[in-house]
Image (tube, rainbow, N blue to C red):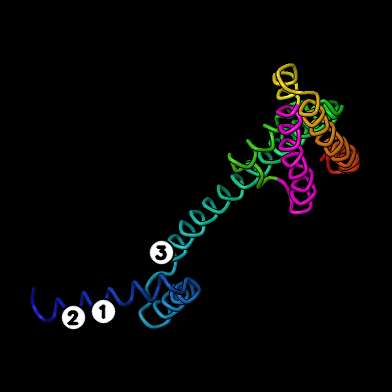
Amino acid sequence: MSWQDSKSNSIIERLNNWLSEDKTIFIFLIIFIIFWSHYFYQIKIEFFYGFLSEFVAGGLGVFLAFYLNRIIEKAKNKKLKKNLLQDLREELEEIKGKLTGQGHLLYPDIWRSAISSGQIRLLDSNQVNRLAKVYRKIQGLEYEAKRVRDAAEDLRRMGPLVSDKERRLLHQRWADYSQILNNLEKELYKMIEEVLKEEWWNP
């Protein structure tokens, strides 16, 4: 490659970088070339009109395709959000029905799935904050419920085998854990009732 060719390629490369960095300057450059060619070299401006027509038509097509895709995506996300809220509402209603002081397993699977799959992004910040507080309470309650179940199992399994004093201790442990669980369930029941009153359940 000759020195002139290398220099020419370098100039073209710099020009391409400059144009890619500033599309507005590129548009003004096209307009300048049209009028400069028309007034000084008498090149038929119809050629450039044809070029611009194709350029604008192509750009408009890309814009419309992008805009249509955004509309479709927005409609899809709206439907997904509605379905997610419906599933979460049903899950909270089911969990509320299990708060009987018996230490039932709660299984907040919909919430966990929404987080792991990324669907939680469909909800706005207020919805996420309100629901996160409720589900943190549910998680804490699951731990306390497990303690009650374990204490009840120890009492059932070891009660007949130990002394009266040890049996009373086992029973007292179960009773203490059950009281803690009962208090937490009342708090959670109230939290669920309050969050279910929100207007955003039916977007």
- Label 3 or label 2, whichever lies nearer to me, is 2
Most extreme residue toward the left is 2
Q: CA distance from mark 1 to mark 3?
A: 26 Å
* Amino acid, disc 1: Ile
* Residue wearing tag 1: 11
Nearest the viewer among 144 and 157 is: 157
Write down the residue under mark 2.
Answer: 7
Looking at the image, residue 149 lies above or below residue 25: above
Residue sitting at 35 percent across and 79 percent down?
41
Secondary structure under the numbered disc 1 in the rendered image: helix
The question of residue 84 being in magenta is answered with: no
Give the residues in magenta: 123-151
Residue located at (85% from left, 36% from top):
185
User: In which quadrant is the N terminus drawn?
Assistant: bottom left
Q: Is residue 188 above or below residue 105?
A: below
The residue where tag 3 is placed is 47
Alpha carbon distance from label 3 to label 2: 30 Å
